Image (cartoon, helix red, strand yellow):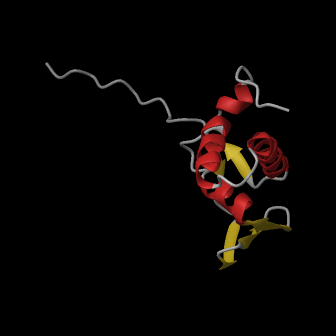
Amino acid sequence: MNVAEGDPANNEKLVRNPDVILREDDPGGALLFNPDTNQIRVLNATALFIWKHCDGKKDVPDIIDELKKAFADVPESEVEIEVKEFVEDMRANGFLGVSMGKLNERPQKSKK
């Protein structure tokens, strides 16, 4: 399963739900708690890396590229699948969303 380049969802910039609490107990992983749904997720090092890269500036292909660079020992065929499945689960359960971009600013009236 490859991330489809033409799929608009893959080009959306991912953002973390600001209400979700991250607790990093050790470098090998972390816990996420979503108070909106009372759900908890246990993250391994790879999932934590993906989570931290959902910063409103990166989309799925960007995160896949970063993950491939950082985790060279992970088989490339698995990287896309893992990222996509993680993002789908996190979005479906309210841990992640997408950036809507900047609000349109009102045009400045020129002073004469």
Identify the residue at horizontal 76%, vertical 31% (top origin): 3
Question: Farthest residue in the bottom direction?
Answer: 25
Residue 49 placement, left or right of 42: left
Q: Quadrant of residue 2?
A: top right
Quarter of the image with the N terminus is: top right
Horizontal and vertical percent position of residue 45: 71, 65
Would you place residue 88 above or below residue 73 in this image?
above
x and y percent of residue 55 in the render? 57, 50
1 above or below 30?
A: above
Up/down of 27 relative to 93, above or below: below
- Which residue: 72% across, 71% down? 29
Compare residues 109 and 103 and report the one nearer the observer.
Answer: 103
Q: Nearer the viewer, residue 92 or 102?
A: 92
x and y, in percent, of residue 53 in the image? 60, 52
Instruction: Classify residue 12 as left or right of residue 38.
Output: left
Residue 34 appears in view? no
Seen from the viewer's position, the closer of residues 34 and 48 is 48
Q: Is residue 76 left or right of residue 49?
A: right
